[in-house]
Image (cartoon, rainbow, N blue to C red):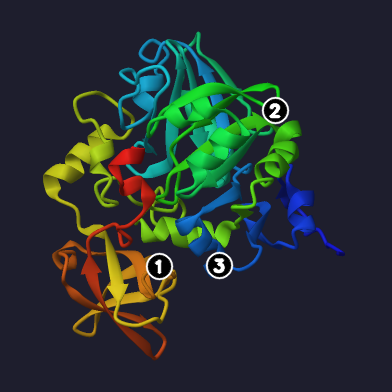
Amino acid sequence: MKYDMQPNLKSTPLLNEHIKSSAKMVPFAGWNMPIQYEGIIAEHSHTRTQASLFDICHMGEFYIKGDAADTGLENIFSFSIGNISVGKCRYGPMLNKEGGIKDDLIVYRLSRDEWMVVVNSATIDKDAEHIKANLKKGAIFENRSEKLAKLDLQGPLSREIVTGLISPDIGRLKYYTFEYFDVLGEKSIVSRTGYTGELGYEFYISSGKAAELWNHLLKDKRLKPAGLGARDTLRLEMGFSLYGRDVTEETTPLEANLERFVNFDRDFIGKDALVRQKKEGVQKILIAFKTDSRRAPRHDYSILKDGKEIGKVTSGSFSPSLSCGIGLGYVDVKFSKAGEAIVIKHGPAEIKAAVVEKPFYKKSSIQGSNVV
């Protein structure tokens, strides 16, 4: 197969594996990434029923050494990290001074005074600059994004696959915990967070080992590779936000329905702005909606009420699991209650929809108590 590399795009260590699998490659956040192999709907369904392997090597990883309070690391996030137990991780936003979301990320506590922060690919540089600028003297910061590869194995059969191919001990991991395991002779972090709503595991391994691990895991024929297309429809069915679309520096956690990841009992960058907004009340808020047909809403479509625009779609897609259109978008807070009838409009086309509670999909393996 002949493959034409697009200029000025970064590639993950798995590029050759994607080419061998005839993946369709597209630009994503400055990276050359696989959007699909067999097809988005097929890969989506396989993840929901069996298991899929995703190349997430474009994500960023920072290592930070130092006491959370003494170094100022604690104040960089809207959520507390000083009370995270070693071996656990926590999701939440990192804000600017105006309360806008600079990124949504996950903090891992590796030891009493050592941390790994996993950030989105498009924000690696600005996140590194922001964190370093707000760390106090004595903290050690290292950007290991180019040295580390990240592979995500997601789906209800994930536990069976990883315990059979890597280690039976991986099966003991609880949700939002991690441990070090021997992975192909390398001491590697394996965690359980995920972005699909299904049982899953994330492997952090040196970039040079990525292709070997990719092919080793795919020895289990129940596992198939999946691209960013399925990853997007899977996360949307769970109502998870996508940075750059559903959450940005122009949206706050209060507007994005992420207030549960804000600890107002402590100081953090952006707190004053959030306290002020909380007192005054938000004007717009992120909603979930479902259409009454298979027609898919898309980013930046208008959201109408009684013929007047009340907001914009931030994420939208056809839901393979529900066989209808679903989406997220910001609307005037007056129209945000579940059951509210709305219309999604693009040009002359109009799609009837209604505000609903998240998640859209309620039968995922992670929602079963046996895997939490």
The percent coordinates of residue 72 (x first, y second) are 39, 17
The percent coordinates of residue 199 (x first, y second) are 43, 44
Q: Residue at x 30, y 18 (%)?
A: 83
Which tag, 3 or 1, sits closer to the chain's start?
3
Q: Residue 27's quadrant in the figure? A: bottom right
Amino acid type, mark 2: Leu
Q: Is residue 7 left or right of residue 141?
A: right
**Dot 2 surroundings within 10 Å: few (below 14), some, or many (20 or more)?**
few
Residue 321: numbered disc: 1
Amino acid type, mark 3: Ala
Which tag, 1 or 2, sits closer to the chain's start?
2
Q: Nearer the viewer, residue 40 or 107?
A: 40
**SS for tag 3?**
helix
**SS for tag 1?**
loop
Q: Is residue 147 left or right of residue 338?
A: right
| Identity of the residue furthest to the right in this view | 2
Residue 42: numbered disc: 3
Residue 184: numbered disc: 2
Q: Nearer the viewer, residue 81 or 95?
A: 81
